[in-house]
């Protein structure tokens, strides 16, 4: 979006001294030309519910759940609770995001002043109509796009829209954009665009478009669910046919009623294939991470953003409001040899002046007013166009005229000529990155003609050079050092002068010489990406360029974070993989950001990275538990369907192993401390263990079933034996993936083992789960199959660890800083070997 949209081509003539009449206002209200703006909802409630409830897997699970209830087998329908919980968590998460987006509003001013029928009135901003005459005074926020018709020393801060930190002088004929703030002077302006057509609301309209944060965990899990979804139909038919054939054939099974058990067996095989618990545990891990960060004053607008920042490899920082607090602070005074006496009193007056701008107000503390305030005889207010102001005092220590402004605007080339004292002082101070201003003196008073023409008095001589610095956030340097050490690239992007931005960058510890002027950036995205890879600091960047820069970095394979606080940052923050806003920033920026730093402390970002790493690493660990179950359930269904064998589990029996060897321990393991570095390839590493391990378990259960049938064991005994094997092997897989063990992990695994023993021992539970004594012969078979399966799992784990080590070494060689390679090569990703230690 351009910074200055086109004005209305044919403005309606309106007398600024009178404004609109009431009939004219009524006419515009009837025509809908008001400033009322109610943007469409970011995402409807129905769309959110449909996306989280009416999904393929919820349909499968819900259908199976209802079938079991109709058949009177509610004991086997416990799996339905997981699907219900998933849907609730997903809806709540998106409802929170919707609520924040719907509250998006750029205009915070409670009232607007207009002139109607020759009278000044205060009205709600929504009641402003096209062609209204706005009365603008210091502190007002412009409620609609307008054209200035009159003004006196009118200055408007457009930094939240354009990124320019300096206020802009506004003269008749200039444009005042909605959302900008009057910082000095006063004036009147005629509205030219209202409501949805205004600049601020166009920002809001585009920013409100809903989008979910990019998440490798969520994308990988969705991919697995898609694969399983394609297989559910044909595999379900295969299993159902086998179960009906085992029951005596389709006709006999229907007539005898044995089809009920065939359907129950088929449902058991299908629901075991779906890793619903993985979605639930991931959501819980995100939610717990978000709650912990909230305690650190970090608001997480979307839960997967906890993971996102841990994957970022380039972070783009807006200078104003991010690296700096947006404030100017006094640095020092440097008197010249011929400094006129009384300059301290003159500076005190400038600091205490009612219309003092941000720079002048910095003088109040070092140069306080003592005694009665000095009265000004004549005064020329500061203008950002001429960049100086002047005041005359009739008598006293500070008598004469004092001029305060930019050295080059007051003294021209002499301010940069190192041959003179002024030029030498200004040049040396400016080269250190400080902003320089000069206080000059003339014995001649300001005349009325001087004030009218806004010209300097005669014989002005420099008295003192003053230096100022932008208030750099105290945590900025430390946080940037952390990201640099972690191999995260830094790009500082600002609307300010490139040299000013570069000076701030050097102050926060970055090794940069000069900033790149964004006005020279190419239109070609490929060339833009190359420049972004070769430069760190960029100045004079427009809002649209910020977004293009983010897109260019993403196109080169980077995961990009963008920080900022102004409206001009909104599009870039929304486009970035992770948008981070300061709480002091614009409402629009905070609403579209994934993370909001509530106390504005940049130093919280390392904690967010650590939390994201914990989520990624631990979910990768537990995902192998769930994916192993999906792998063996799918293979088991295919094997038993092809071999026409009765499925060896009831749904309720699978609930035992799902809960005590996967679901419950996964919840605890997902919340463990874990600071290992993020390494791409989560799904590939997880499946490299889960698929072979799942196939081994499926083959083992098939061999056990064939062996048990040859021994002539009863159906209930066969199912009990299958449940015992799966429980033992499941506990072992849990133990393998939890290595290296610590007291916390041993406690979790031990509790699950005790739970399994209790379920197989307590009469009430054995009756509910239909568990019986498998018999002596079957017990030996169970022990043999379980021991062989455990041995095979250890072999798979050994090979998997070597595979992960090679992938980590390759990643370290490509992207991890030299100092961290040793850690990376020995840093097993959750699936590889526990937590790395730093």
Image (cartoon, rainbow, N blue to C red):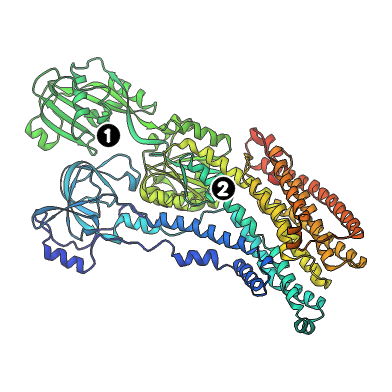
Rounded to the nearest whole Å, what is the CA distance between mark 1 and mark 2?
A: 39 Å
Decide if residue 386 is on the left or right side of residue 601: left
Decide if residue 505 is on the left or right side of residue 111: right
Image position, residue 412 (x, y; %): 25, 30
The residue depicted at 27 percent of the width and 32 percent of the height is 359
The residue depicted at 25 percent of the width and 55 percent of the height is 144
Depth check, mark 1 against mark 2: the one in front is 2
- Residue 70 sits above or below residue 17 on the image: below
Asked if disc 1 and disc 2 are in contact, CB closer than 8 Å, the reply is no
- Residue 438 sits above or below residue 144 on the image: above
Q: Quadrant of residue 824?
A: top right
- Residue that label 2 marks: 307
- In depth, the one of 250 and 56 nearer the eye is 250
- Residue 84 sits above or below residue 510 on the image: below
The residue depicted at 57 percent of the width and 44 percent of the height is 612
Tell me the crowding category of disc 2: few under 14, some 14 to 19, or many 20 or more residues within 10 angstroms, Cα based. many
Tell me the crowding category of disc 1: few under 14, some 14 to 19, or many 20 or more residues within 10 angstroms, Cα based. some
Q: Quadrant of the C terminus?
A: top right
Q: Quadrant of the N terminus?
A: bottom left
Decide if residue 426 is on the left or right side of residue 20: right
Q: Earlier in the sequence, mark 1 or mark 2?
A: 2
Image position, residue 589 (x, y; %): 39, 49
- In depth, the one of 77 and 630 nearer the eye is 77
Image position, residue 746 (x, y; %): 73, 41
- Residue that label 1 marks: 358
Q: Quadrant of residue 74?
A: bottom right
Disc 2 on helix, strand or loop? helix
- In depth, the one of 271 and 598 nearer the eye is 271
Disc 1 on helix, strand or loop? helix
Is residue 363 visible to the viewer in this orientation of the structure?
A: yes
């Amino acid at each position: 979006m351009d910074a200055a949209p086109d004005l209305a081509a044919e403005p309606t003539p309106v007398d600024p001294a009178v404004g609109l009449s009431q009939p004219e206002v009524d006419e515009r209200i009837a025509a809908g030309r008001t400033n009322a703006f109610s943007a469409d909802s970011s995402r409807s409630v129905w769309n959110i519910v449909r996306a989280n409830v009416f999904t393929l897997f919820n349909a499968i699970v819900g259908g199976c759940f209802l079938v079991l209830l109709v058949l009177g087998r509610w004991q086997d329908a416990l799996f339905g609770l997981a699907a219900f919980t998933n849907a609730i968590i997903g809806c709540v998460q998106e409802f929170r995001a919707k609520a924040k987006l719907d509250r998006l509003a750029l205009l915070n001013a409670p009232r607007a002043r207009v002139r109607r029928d020759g009278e000044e009135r205060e009205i709600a901003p929504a009641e402003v109509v096209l062609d209204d005459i706005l009365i603008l005074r210091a502190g007002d926020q412009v409620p609609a796009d307008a054209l200035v018709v009159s003004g006196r020393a009118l200055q408007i801060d457009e930094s939240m829209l354009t990124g320019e930190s300096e206020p802009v002088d506004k003269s008749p004929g200039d444009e005042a954009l909605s959302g900008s703030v009057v910082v000095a002077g006063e004036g009147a302006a005629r509205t030219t665009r209202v409501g949805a057509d205004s600049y601020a609301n166009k920002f809001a309209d585009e920013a409100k478009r809903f989008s979910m944060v990019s998440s490798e965990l969520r994308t990988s899990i969705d991919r697995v669910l898609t694969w399983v979804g394609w297989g559910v139909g044909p595999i379900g038919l295969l299993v159902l046919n086998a179960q009906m054939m085992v029951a005596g054939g389709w006709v006999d099974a229907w007539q005898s009623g044995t089809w009920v058990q065939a359907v129950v067996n088929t449902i058991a095989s299908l629901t075991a294939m779906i890793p619903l618990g993985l979605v639930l545990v991931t959501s819980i891990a995100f939610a717990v991470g978000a709650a912990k960060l909230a305690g650190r004053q970090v608001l997480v607008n979307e839960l997967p953003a906890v993971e996102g920042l841990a994957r970022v490899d380039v972070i783009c920082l807006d200078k104003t409001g991010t690296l700096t607090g947006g404030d100017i602070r006094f640095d020092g005074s440097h008197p010249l040899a011929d400094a006129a006496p009384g300059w301290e009193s003159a500076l005190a007056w400038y600091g205490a002046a009612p219309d003092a701008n941000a720079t002048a107000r910095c003088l109040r503390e070092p140069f306080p007013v003592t005694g009665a305030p000095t009265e000004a005889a004549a005064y020329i207010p500061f203008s950002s166009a001429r960049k100086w102001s002047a005041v005359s005092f009739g008598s006293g220590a500070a008598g004469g005229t004092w001029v305060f402004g930019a050295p080059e605007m007051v003294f021209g080339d002499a301010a940069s000529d190192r041959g003179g004292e002024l030029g030498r002082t200004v040049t040396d101070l400016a080269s250190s990155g400080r902003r320089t201003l000069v206080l000059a003196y003339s014995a001649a008073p300001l005349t009325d003609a001087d004030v009218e023409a806004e010209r300097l008095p005669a014989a002005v001589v420099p008295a003192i050079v003053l230096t100022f610095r932008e208030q750099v956030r105290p945590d900025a340097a430390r946080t940037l050092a952390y990201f640099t050490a972690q191999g995260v690239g830094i790009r500082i992007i600002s609307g300010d002068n490139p040299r000013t931005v570069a000076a701030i960058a050097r102050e926060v510890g970055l090794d940069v010489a000069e900033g790149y002027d964004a006005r020279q950036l190419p239109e070609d995205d490929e060339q833009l990406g190359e420049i972004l890879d070769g430069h760190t600091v960029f100045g004079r960047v427009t809002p649209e360029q910020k977004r293009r820069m983010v897109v260019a970095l993403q196109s080169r394979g980077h995961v990009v974070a963008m920080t900022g606080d102004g409206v001009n940052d909104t599009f870039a923050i929304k486009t970035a993989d992770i948008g981070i806003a300061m709480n002091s920033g614009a409402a629009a920026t905070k609403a579209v950001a994934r993370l909001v730093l509530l106390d504005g402390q940049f130093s919280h970002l390392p904690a967010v990275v650590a939390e994201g790493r914990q989520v990624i690493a631990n979910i990768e660990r537990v995902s192998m538990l769930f994916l192993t179950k999906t792998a063996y359930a799918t293979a088991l269904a295919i094997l038993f369907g092809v071999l026409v064998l009765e499925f060896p589990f009831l749904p309720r029996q699978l609930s035992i192993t799902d809960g005590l060897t996967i679901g419950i321990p996964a919840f605890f393991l997902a919340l463990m401390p874990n600071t290992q570095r993020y390494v791409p390839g989560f799904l590939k590493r997880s499946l490299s263990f889960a698929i072979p391990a799942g196939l081994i378990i499926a083959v083992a259960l098939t061999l056990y079933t064939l062996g048990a049938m040859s021994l002539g064991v009863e159906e209930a005994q066969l199912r009990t034996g299958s449940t015992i094997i799966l429980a033992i092997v499941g506990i072992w897989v849990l133990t393998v993936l939890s290595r290296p063990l610590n007291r916390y992990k041993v406690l979790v695994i031990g509790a699950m083992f005790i739970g399994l023993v209790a379920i197989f021992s307590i009469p009430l539970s054995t009756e509910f789960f239909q568990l019986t004594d498998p018999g002596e012969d079957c017990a030996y078979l169970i022990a043999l199959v379980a021991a062989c399966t455990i041995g095979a799992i250890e072999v798979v784990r050994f090979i998997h660890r070597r595979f992960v080590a090679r992938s980590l070494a390759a990643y370290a060689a490509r992207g991890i800083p030299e100092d961290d390679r040793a850690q990376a090569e020995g840093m097993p990703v959750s699936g590889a070997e526990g937590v790395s230690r730093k």
